[in-house]
Amino acid sequence: MKFYSLFLERLGQYHRKERCGNTGKLARFCLYSILATIILSFFLYFPYLLSPLPRCDFKQQYAPVVGHQEYGIANCDLFKGHWVPDDRGSRYTNSSCATIPESNNCFKQGRKDNDFLKWRWKPNECDLPRFDAKVFLDMIRGDKMAFIGDSVARNQMESLLCLLALEEVPKDVYKDPEDRLRIWQFPEYDFTLMTLWSRFLVVGDHKVINGSLEFENLHLDKIDESWMTNLPTLDYAIIAVEHWFFRPIYLYEGEKIVGCVYCQDSSITNVGVKGAIQMTFRAAFNYINDCNECRGIVTVVRTYSPSHFEYGGWNTGGSCNRTSPIGEGEIGLGGEEWELRRIQVEEIQTARKEGNRKGKSFVTMDVTKAMMMRPDGHPGEFWGNK
């Protein structure tokens, strides 16, 4: 379904009062995270396409943006497109954004080329305006948004933070001892931006034998408290989790083992990475839908984004040496990455049907193809962990 069609469909769910109506809820760093946030920024630049404003508020505030003929995004699939050169470069740089972590600053870590900054995403059926921090902050005034997941989720938050800092300097209000929970506030807009670290979304405990990791136990009936306890306070939950599933895993429901990944036990069903992700996402989405205190929340799932290492993994001699995007014909849409994306899309479609009945919104941010075409944006060796 086109996002604008979703907007029109959902528009009638809101009531008016006085002249207009109650405002409903709007709906590894370096360039790798910037690229992910390029996608995220235009996706969230038009949050009314996901969970709309009342009709009159929409017309008064944002119709000039949506209706602008030169963009033509009303019936455009934002996720089908290609990368085109853009000499204007990124809206922020490693030197202009004060909040980029030192370890994630690719240029300070030795990267020399910068052409990877000079591309923009071009949907096939439309053009996109550049991200406008003021418009965005006006839209989500008074709301709270959290990025839930692994390091990619954290890096997307960091990149969005840099974009929004162009309008207002954020206030760093909280960091836990392990730097897994971070909270930033934009006082002028009463907007809160958070990152909530979670490797698997559900509870996971790892078994270490002789100093090395042997396997992970995932408990599908226990949601990770790192994000569960914060969920009722959120207006937007942006979920990005996948890469920790590529390891030996045993999946439990209660005391019963229901599957495994990379295990050698013939008595246990090997569900593979795809099965583990499917079961975990289903458990997380069921929890969100069953959360009585979470009415009105918008859950956005960022689909699988590849690691881009070639000729080996990040710790087995692999490298990320490309300096320009690759074409759509050079990526394979029949491999594991595309299968993982398919599973995520299916699970969120299932969750959306239930969510519609319970006042919850579920949306897919389908960036897999766009990210597959940008191996040049990965930091590779130019990050803090050598």
Image: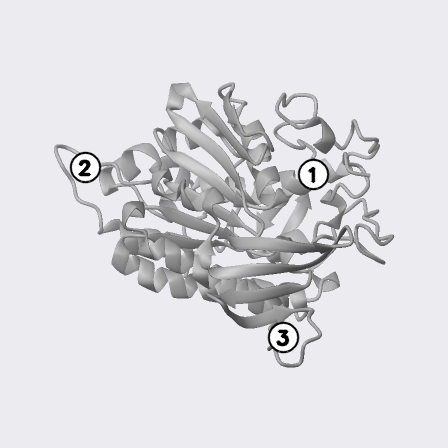
Compare marks 3 and 1 and give the one earlier in the sequence. Answer: 1
Determine if residue 128 is in view: no
Residue nearer the viewer, 134 or 222 = 222
Q: Which mark identifies residue 31? A: 1
Residue 376, percent from left and from top: 76, 46
Compare marks 2 and 1 and give the one earlier in the sequence. Answer: 2
Give the CA separation, mark 3 to mark 1. 36 Å
Determine if residue 350 is in view: yes
Q: Secondary structure at mark 1?
A: helix
Label 2 belongs to which residue? Answer: 21
Label 3 belongs to which residue? Answer: 270
Q: How many other residues sit within 10 Å of disc 2, few (<14), some (14-19) or many (≥20)?
A: some
Residue found 35% across the figure and 36% down from its top: 62
Q: Is 355 on the left-hand or right-hand side of 329?
A: left
Residue 373, percent from left and from top: 70, 54
Query: Where is 113 relative to 168, above or below?
Result: below
Give the CA separation, mark 2 to mark 3. 52 Å
Mark 3 or mark 1, whichever is nearer to me: 3
Mark 2: amino acid:
Gly
Give the CA separation, mark 2 to mark 1. 41 Å
Residue 24, percent from left and from top: 27, 40
* Image quarter hosting the N terminus: bottom left
Residue nearer the viewer, 84 or 137 = 137
* Image quarter hosting the C terminus: top right
